[in-house]
C-alpha cells in the first residue's frame, strides 16, 4: 500500500482471519481508511475482487506450495515486477454495458487500455498524480519487466521442487534482511509454475470398474 498512486478511501474484505485481525484494523485506523467486511455467507460479495486471483495471481504464480522465507522473498520480487507490468504495460478491457436480445447477451467494452492510461484519462485524478505516473512510465522497460517475471517464475519452480529442510523462523540473520527489503523491493529494477512436475507415481491408475470387464471400445461400451 505504500506505493499506490491514488488516495485509498476504504477497504472492504471478506471474513477471512487474514484480514479480520487487530493488525489490519489498527493500520486502517492509523491511515484513516474505512474498514468494512462483506456479509457472512455471501461469497459472491467479493466476486469482482476474487476473480483477480485467477486472472493475475494464479495465472502467473500457479498452484504450487511455497514455504519458508526464501519463497516469500522470491514472491515479493516477482510481485514487484508484476505490479508494474500489469499497471503500466498490460492493457485490459472494461465492460461498458450489456444488451439482452432474447437469449443472447451482447457485451460492449471500452477500448483496451492499461490502468495507467485509464488514470491519465480520468479528469478526477489530480495533476500531480498524473505527473508521477508519467515519470514512472518513461523509466520502465516492458521487455525487462517481462524477463524479470519469467526469472521470478523460474525461481519459484526451483524453490517448490527443493526438499523442505527445517529452518528456525526466528533466526534474525534470515528475517531481518527480508523484512527490511519489503519496503523497497517493489522499486527494484513467466518456466511456468502453474503445473507441478508429473512423475510416474502421480499418474492415477485406472480401476477395474472404470470401463467394465467387457469390450473397452466405444462400440462395446454402447452395446454393453
Image (spheres, helix red, strand yellow):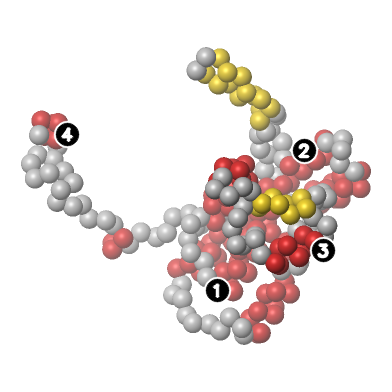
Residue at (59, 58) in percent of width and height: 16
On the image, which quarter does residue 220 sit in?
A: top left
- Measured along the vertical axis of the image, is residue 214 above or below residue 206? above
Mark closest to the chain's N terminus, 4 or 2: 2
Residue sitting nearer the eye, 180 or 21 = 21
Q: Is residue 34 left or right of residue 149?
A: right
Q: Which mark is residue 68?
A: 1
Q: Which residue is mark 4?
A: 218
Which residue in the rendered view is the most extreme toward the front? 40
Q: Quadrant of residue 20?
A: bottom right
Which is nearer the N-term, disc 2 or disc 1?
1
Q: Nearer the viewer, mark 3 or mark 4?
A: 3
User: Dot 2: what SS?
Assistant: helix
Q: Are marks 1 and 3 in contact (CB under 8 Å)?
A: no
- Does residue 52 appear anywhere in the picture? no
Q: In the rendered view of the protein, which quadrant contains the N terminus?
A: bottom right
Q: Is disc 3 surrounded by few (<14), some (14 to 19) or many (20+) residues within 10 Å?
A: few
Using residue 196 as the reference point, say whether residue 215 is left or right of it.
Answer: left
Tell me which residue sits at (48%, 64%) in the image. 65
Query: Badge 2 local density, few (<14 within 10 Å), some, or many (20+)?
Result: some
Q: Secondary structure at mark 3?
A: helix
**Mark 3 touches mark 4? (CB < 8 Å):** no
- Within 10 Å of disc 4 (Cα), the crowding (few <14, some 14-19, many 20+) is few
The Cα atoms of the two marked residues, 3 and 4, are separated by 66 Å
Quadrant the C terminus occupies: top left
Q: Nearer the viewer, mark 2 or mark 3?
A: 3
Residue 31: x and y, percent? 82, 60
Check disc 3 and report the residue beneath it: 30
- Name the spot of residue 116 as percent of width and height, x first: 77, 43
Residue at the spot of label 2: 118
Q: Is residue 11 visible?
A: yes
Residue 51 sits above or below residue 178 on the image: above
Amino acid at each position: 500500500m505504500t506505493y499506490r498512486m491514488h488516495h485509498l478511501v476504504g477497504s472492504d474484505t471478506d471474513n477471512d482471519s487474514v484480514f479480520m485481525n487487530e493488525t489490519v484494523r489498527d493500520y486502517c485506523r492509523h491511515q484513516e481508511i474505512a474498514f468494512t467486511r462483506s456479509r457472512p455467507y455471501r461469497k459472491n460479495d467479493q466476486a469482482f475482487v476474487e476473480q483477480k486471483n485467477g486472472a493475475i495471481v494464479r495465472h502467473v504464480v500457479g498452484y504450487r506450495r511455497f514455504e519458508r522465507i526464501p519463497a516469500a522473498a522470491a514472491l515479493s520480487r516477482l510481485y514487484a515486477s508484476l505490479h508494474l507490468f500489469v499497471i503500466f504495460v498490460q492493457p485490459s478491457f472494461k465492460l461498458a454495458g450489456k444488451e439482452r436480445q432474447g437469449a443472447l447477451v451482447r457485451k460492449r467494452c471500452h477500448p483496451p487500455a492499461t490502468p495507467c492510461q485509464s488514470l491519465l484519462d480520468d479528469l478526477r485524478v489530480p495533476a500531480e498524480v498524473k505527473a508521477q505516473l508519467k515519470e514512472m512510465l518513461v523509466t520502465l522497460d516492458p521487455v525487462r519487466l517481462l524477463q524479470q517475471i519469467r526469472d521470478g517464475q523460474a525461481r519459484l519452480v526451483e524453490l517448490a521442487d527443493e526438499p523442505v529442510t527445517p529452518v528456525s523462523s526466528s533466526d534474525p540473520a534470515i528475517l531481518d534482511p527480508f523484512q527490511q527489503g519489503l519496503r523497497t523491493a517493489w522499486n527494484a529494477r513467466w518456466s511456468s509454475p502453474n503445473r507441478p512436475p508429473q512423475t510416474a507415481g502421480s499418474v492415477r491408475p485406472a480401476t477395474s470398474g472404470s470401463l467394465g470387464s467387457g469390450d473397452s471400445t466405444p462400440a462395446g461400451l454402447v452395446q454393453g
